[in-house]
Image (tube, coloured by chain):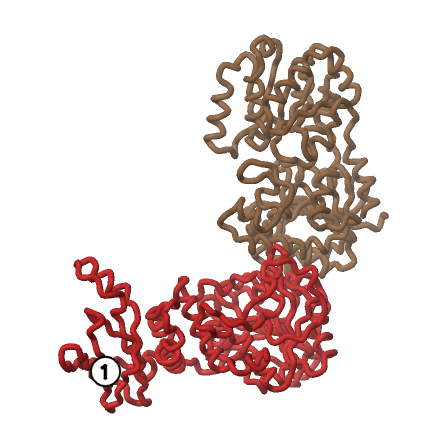
Amino acid sequence: MSCGSSMLAMIFSWPPQRVQLSISTPNNDVAANWIRCARADVSSHLAQRGAGGGGPDHGFVCFIPQPAGSIGAHLAIEIGSAGPKRVRIATAPASEMAMPTVRMILNTFNSRHPQLRQLLDRHVGPAVDAAWSARYRAPVTPIVEHFGAPAGAPAAAPAGAPAAAPEVSLIVPLFGRHDFVEYQLALFADDPDFRNAELIYVVDDPYIFEEFRGRCDGLYGMYRIPFTVVYPHSNLGFAGANNCGAKVARGKHLLLMNSDVMPKQNGWLGAMLASYRNTPGIGILGVKLLYENGSVQHAGMEFRRSTAWANMWINYHPFKGQSGLGLQGLHAIDAVTAACVLIEADLYRTLGGLSEEYIVGDFEDSDLCLRALEAGRRNYLALDIELYHLERQSQNRVGDGTLRTNLSIYNCWRHDRRWSGFIAGLKA
Amino acid sequence: MSAERVMILAHGHPDFSLGGGEIAAHGQWAELRRRGIPTMFIARVAQGTSPAGAWFSTRSADGSEMLFNAPHTNNFRHSQPNLAVVFTEFRELLERFAPTVVHFHHYVHLGLELVREVRKSAPGAKIVMTLHEYLAICNAQGQMLKTSGTLCTKAAPLDCHFCFPDVSPQDFFMRNLFIKSFLNLVDRFICPSAFLRDRYVAWGIPSEKMEVLENGQPPDAGEARRVAPSARMRASFVALGQLSARKGTLVLLEAVRLLPKRVRSQMQIEIHGSAQYERADFLADCAKLCKGLEDTVRMFGPYRPGDVSDIISRHGWVITPSIWWENSPLVIQEAFACGRPVICSNVGGMAEKVRAGIDGLHFRVGSSGDLAAVMERAMSEPGLFEQLCGGVRQPPSVAQTIDRLLEVY
């Protein structure tokens, strides 16, 4: 299959143990570092015909890097078991719809593969990278609409006069459900901290934009909390949506907030800002997040090696599901979840925002935290500030369990490739 | 005090729906007007009945009685989806009437957003809210009766999800946060029973905002037909009100079946009320249980409010066998107004209003066996009927309630 200008070859053979495979392209590059893998579809087909046996490893996976512009090339595959045989395969032009390709690639491997790391390093990883970087990106002229006077704008300002920068801009991406906005506004409405805050909703879902927009006049009229709606015309994913909102934001600080995060009580925003201002050298500030039953959803993230996932670093959530009553104070920490974080706007921009190279939304929060650490800042966790996180909104965005797992593994691999050494240094 | 201007909002108008809450709200409006206090009554009516598409329309020429042709609310979080009606037409009404007190007799069918609009557009007005059942706490029609049929003592997202598997715990949690964000704006809550007050305090409303106060009995058109209890009535029982499983109709019928024939032959039971909103299987259950009891139990169907005293006066005992907590059932006050003792389930507002051994008897909620035993005792224990009749106190009138409400205002 085509991934950008490159290709991922998935071949099966029978009987498996007698095949010698080499692949050459029109440029005569020979790709011989293929990896064998199980093919359940082939095995079951053979078993039905009474031709099973010899093990399940009928498959071969091979990533074939190709320079840009070589779309439409032919592949020659040499199968050496019974003398050389050339098979020519026409390759289709790469699709700008990257997600279906990514899905297909991710469906080709099993996370229990004994050579998971090599499979990711040599084949699956580069193939997804290539497919994802070829994706269509909408022209960046999002629709921006203000409902109510923007925060910090003097009531009688002459037209066109720049409004004073608000202390903080909240950026809340919306995907799937937009009724969360109504709940949030009902809980923001009586909080005096919102008087000097800019609230930005980034509609990251073309399917809900018109319906949500139809509600906005009413929502402002009812709750009288001014807000800005940003619509980038396409689904950018969590990182892209936040970055899109950050371009519009005028605040000195940015508060990245998920739409399913709900305040527990008034004053949380001011408390976060005070904590941030009073902590020299701070990069990113996270808070304690609770499930609807009051147990801990997030009290910081900890890098741990996953033996199940080829010893890569994963983001472990300590205390998850446990009582958080004893967790208090402000603590330096390596990483926090982006479901509710505060960061200086200039720092966010200097760091380049959230990385859009992770797919759908995973690991970009720890990636940002690590970049803040790399830049010499320290990240903190304010355990005395509590909000609810009804973690569910992003569920089922991609598909079923296998695909979700494999997508997480890909993002994990990407994160590990970039940060493995750095994290080991933090642990040392 | 004479400077007060009161706006009363209700979820229905008694001319169209005869619920206890509607009657109480309208009665309080009439009493305030009688005292010369400028008072506006706004009652929600079902959509599509107002002239020329106006959301609010007058019911009386002077505009003191209004109908709110409210768009249908979201019955999960009791939200008014047409927000523009709230911050345009309702706001205009608030600004023109300039109330010093806004008394919500409910928010169901109206929308909680109206409370916020009062707070914003009439910031000086005191917001008072009468709580009629446990609707803010419980999605099962506010009755805290689990869909499995067992009594519920505390709402929690996971527990509520088990009652309504299609609704996630997270959505129940957000419902809770959302509703509280509006109830937080209310200055005083009127609780017709201490039991209801305690439930709401346990749920999170500060106890200092709570006032226990009966809605008050409106003047009774049939008062003249009241007959004092007499000894020959002690084997005569009556149940009034809506017929439904929740109201305990089946518990009562089962109890009668459990009594020995010899006891049954000496007693008389009347059941008055309509089952118009009930499902066919409930009616079938009723018919099955009534079979063979024709000489003891008689079903009378719907009645007019003016006939209540007349109906009760022909009997000795009033039975309220509800299998949910109730708050302050109107029928208990009506029984006391007629001087009759009450046999009720031993939970919630019923057990609070009826004092066991003083002005009535309790039986274990949902237990037809216990109800049968209590009924047998009621008709046979010498002196008991007379003793309990002597313990009955008159319920407060609307006028007495208004005296106390004006202190709250």
**Seen in the image, is A39 located left or right of residue B192?**
left
Task: Identify the chain of the residue marked 1, using the numbered disc in the image.
Answer: A
Q: Is residue B62 visible?
A: no
x, y (%) of residue A298? Answer: 60, 65
Q: Amino acid at mark 1?
A: Ser
Q: Is residue B171 above or below residue B17?
A: below
Pick out the residue farthest to the right: B1
Q: Can you tell which quarter of the image residue B366 is in?
A: top right
**Seen in the image, is A196 located left or right of residue B366?**
right
Q: Is residue A401 above or below residue A336?
A: above
> Which chain is represented by red in the image?
A
Question: Depth check: B156 or B360 in front?
Answer: B156
Q: Secondary structure at mark 1?
A: strand
User: Crowdedness of circle 1 by 10 Å Cα count: few (<14), some, many (20+)?
Assistant: some
Q: Is residue B226 above or below residue B332?
A: above
Q: Is residue A139 visible?
A: yes
Question: Depth check: A110 or A134 in front?
Answer: A110
x, y (%) of residue B213? Answer: 77, 39
Residue shown at the point (64%, 38%) measured from the top left: B14
Q: Can you tell which quarter of the image residue B400 is in?
A: top right
Question: Depth check: B218 or A34 in front?
Answer: A34
Chain B takes which shade in the image? brown
